[in-house]
Image (spheres, grey):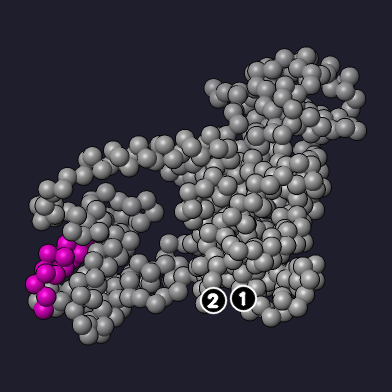
Amino acid sequence: MEKETDLCTVVVLESSRSLIAQRLEEDLALTIMGLISDDPGTWEEAKSVWPRYRSPAVCEAPESLPFDESSLTEVMEVLAVSESWMVIDFQTKRILSGGSFEPVGRDASLAMTLDKKGRDKCPLVIHIPPWWELHEGASLFSIHEPRQEPMSKPRVDREILYGAPFLSCLASRVLDLHASAEWPESDGDLDDFHGLTLRVHRDWLMTPREDLGGRIPRELLHGAIHWSDHVTEGQQRRFHDVGKLIAVPKDWAEYDTAPMGSQELCVYFDYCRDMIRAAWGWCLENENLISTLDHTLAVKELLDFLIRCNQDWMSESYDDGPCPRFVIECDRRRVPIGDGVVIEGMDEVAKSSHIIDCNCPICLMMAEGAFGPSFSRIDGHHLELDEDFAFSMAETLEDWELEHREYDDSSESDDEEDSPFQDPQNDEELVSVWGPMRSDLPIPGDVQGHLKMAFMVADIVSVLQSYSNRILEIQSLNLAFSEYRKADGRRLKKATKKFKRLLETLANRYPELVSKSADLQSRIDESARVLSIDGDE
């Protein structure tokens, strides 16, 4: 006898109304809880992100949910006799659950459906924002109680960070330095200004401001990075199952002041540095003009220039990828950036940043889309290069100091393990980067073994590149591998013979390729055997 589905009562509390839905299936209740991951301010905003969390296990649209408006007194009477219940209080930003409602935790990935092989499909990924309180196993009395901690949600004033307040502060500071003895003698090389760049950038981030209520600009960058990144990563996981990315709407009440994720933080670092460098360059090019103007007029001239730089910078390619404006919007709307991937709710599409300028078979496969859409992220390592807490991704000085101690301890441990007497000739496995690809263990998602073969072909290409004028042989090898990968049926048999024949020819010409060619041919034969067995089944 099958277990009866657990039913739950879900209550939504807002400042002006109370909504209640009785006898909801557990999957529906959990999906509603998942909506809070995006930090909606109202139930209407929460419903707008239903497509970002919906699975085939629940209704297609939230309008199908049986919510009725009721008084708080009536709500409490229903909850008193409910075996399982959950309350979402938008006014105090709290989630409370009790009775037999199973604890979920702040961060969870729940299997909502399974594929034919019993594997998780379309998981519900929940990441409750850190300023929301979660009370599981709560009593009904706690619904009327206040929050346990003051709400500390970061509010970002992007007009101050990106606009005239920052740029005018920058212009004034740079021109003060231009008039001081600290101004370096330079022949136009902006690297001469690196020390001053660090100082100006640090001063901007770490100086309290009246228009921020005495806070420092750096505080606006932190407080939500891990939460925002986790939500975005959850949407990327979901994309691989449903093939769709959906952005958080821009019309939410608190969208303009929403916290930063790591991608916007990294872009903002580069924005500050590039605006500072632009200011140095303007001063070097306008020495005569500056000498004829008083400080106020000079600041205005430089500010007008920086405003134009801002507009250009936001629309130009960022690190050979999408423009900063697009990267920032994706981060704020919590969607990953995938080459050529359409994002529902956004007009712009990221063009592929992978440029084929080499003869690497792995690059060629990526360009052909053999591995599916490629997603890119900024890892932020360059924020740590100056070894200064002000610029780092760490939220607090304590966190930053701890990371550095752990890194130093790790480096010392690695140094102790390294032996100066190790003979690399005795460790043949280290000679080839692609050695591990010869393992018999399959690579997830590489059903036909083409990715493993690509690493082995790349190994052969690297040997051929050590000789001069071998481009035709390299191109022939890549072409034969490409034809083999794309062939099916009768064409596969012919393409396989051509590919193996070319590998034998290369082995005869270059003795160092004998074992590599043999290994790859064995891999081809093994792939054919596996595919033959799968076909019979």
Q: CA distance from mark 1 to mark 2?
A: 7 Å
Mark 1 sits on what residue? 284
Viewer-nearest residue: 418 or 484: 418
- Residue 418 magenta-drawn? no
Q: Nearer the viewer, residue 292 or 437?
A: 292
Q: Is residue 106 visible?
A: yes
In which quadrant of the rendered image does the N terminus lie? top right
Give the x, y percent position of residue 426: 9, 52
Residue 68 position in % (x across, y down) = 85, 32
Residue 112 disc label: none
Task: Judge from the rendering whether residue 188 lies leftward or rightward of residue 249; answer left or right.
Answer: left
Q: Residue at x 48, y 37 (%)?
A: 401
At label 1, the amino acid type is Leu
Contact, mark 1 vs mark 2 (Cβ under 8 Å): yes
Seen at 27% across and 68% down, the residue is 458
**Mark 1 burial class by Cα count in 10 Å: few <14, some 14-19, many 20+:** some
Q: Which residues are magenta?
A: 509-527
379 sits to left or right of 89: left
**Could you say whether the residue bearing mark 2 is in a helix, strand or loop?**
loop
* Secondary structure state at the residue bearing disc 1: helix
Q: Image check: 329 left or right of 414?
A: right
Q: Choose top left, top right, bottom left or bottom right for residue 309.
A: bottom right
The majority secondary structure of the magenta stretch comes to: helix
Kind of residue at disc 2: Gly
Residue behind mark 2: 188
